[in-house]
Image (cartoon, helix red, strand yellow):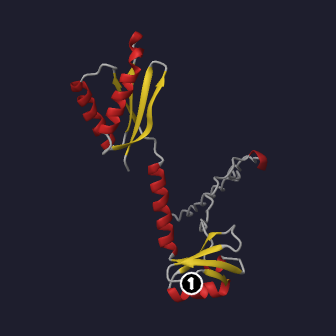
């Protein structure tokens, strides 16, 4: 006869309770006083370039002296001057603001600026320092040496350079200063087609100078 054994009941294992340790909060950056913070990168400042001259409605004078091509020069009320410029299809440019009344030219403003830039360039080129080439003679320079130096002088003048020719009187040769003057005058005469005399023969110490500049 089979014995009925009591059934064993398995008690489920208790769930492991979750960790009660609180999570660490992210670290906050250290506070830096405002006056110790590095400055922000400065933004580039936008510069608005204004016209170098007052034109059209920017002209504040009540009347102006009008000049230009295809206009009758004279003093006009500003509105009349603007009307004339508008009929010609050009701008009214104030070219002499300190005059009484201000002088204005009827001209295309872009063309006016181009002409101004061109003039400034020419002035700059003309004001550039011109180099000076020196040519030395003796009071007894012979014809061969004279012609050789004359050839070089012509080349210098054609290149736009000045010539500073001089006769050097060594020792007692100063007694031949008249001969040196005649030599320099002969030299100047030979250069007439290529240059102009800036200074006639002049004695300074033991040297007699002649200055010749190129013809423009």
Secondary structure category for the residue under label 1: loop
**Location of residue 139 in the rendering, given as x and y in whole percent from the top left corner:** 34, 20
Q: Left or right of 45: which side holds 136?
A: left
In the image, what residue occupies the spot 30% across and 45% down?
Answer: 193
Q: Is residue 213 visible?
A: yes
- Please state which of residues 137 and 52 is positioned toward the viewer in this rendering: 137
What residue is shown with label 1?
72
Q: Give the quadrant of residue 190.
A: top left
Q: In the rendered image of this protein, does residue 212 appear above or below residue 60?
A: above
Q: Left or right of 27: which side holds 145?
A: left
In the image, what residue occupies the spot 46% across and 45% down?
Answer: 128
Q: Give the quadrant of residue 105.
A: bottom right
**Location of residue 6 in the rendering, given as x and y in whole percent from the top left corner:** 57, 63
Q: Residue furthest left?
A: 144
In the image, what residue occupies the spot 47% across and 66% down?
Answer: 115
Q: Left or right of 110: which side holds 27?
A: right
Q: In the rendered image of this protein, does residue 73 appear above or below residue 135?
A: below
- Please state which of residues 110 and 76 is positioned toward the viewer in this rendering: 76
- Please state which of residues 184 and 76 is positioned toward the viewer in this rendering: 184
In the image, what residue occupies the spot 46% across and 56% down?
Answer: 121
- Please state which of residues 40 and 73 is positioned toward the viewer in this rendering: 73
Q: In the rendered image of this protein, does residue 138 appear above or below residue 9?
A: above
């Amino acid at each position: 006869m089979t014995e009925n054994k009591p059934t064993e009941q398995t008690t489920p294992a208790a769930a492991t309770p979750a960790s009660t340790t609180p999570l660490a909060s992210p670290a906050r950056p250290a506070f830096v006083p405002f006056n110790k913070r590095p400055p922000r990168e400065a933004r580039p400042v936008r510069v608005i370039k204004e016209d170098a001259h007052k034109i059209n409605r920017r002209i504040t004078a009540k009347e102006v002296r009008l000049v230009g091509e295809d206009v009758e020069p004279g003093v006009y009320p500003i509105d009349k001057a603007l009307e004339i410029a508008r009929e010609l299809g050009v701008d009214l440019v104030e070219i002499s603001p300190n005059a009484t009344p201000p002088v204005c030219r009827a001209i295309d403003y872009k063309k006016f600026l181009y002409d101004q830039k061109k003039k400034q360039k020419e002035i700059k080129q003309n004001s550039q320092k011109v180099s000076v080439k020196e040519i030395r003679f003796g009071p007894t320079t012979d014809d061969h040496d004279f012609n050789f130096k004359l050839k070089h002088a012509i080349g210098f003048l054609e290149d736009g350079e000045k010539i500073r020719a001089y006769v050097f009187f060594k020792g007692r040769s100063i007694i031949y200063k008249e001969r040196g003057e005649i030599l320099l005058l002969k030299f100047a005469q030979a250069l007439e087609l290529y240059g102009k005399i800036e200074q006639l023969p002049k004695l300074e110490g033991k040297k007699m100078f002649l200055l010749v500049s190129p013809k423009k």
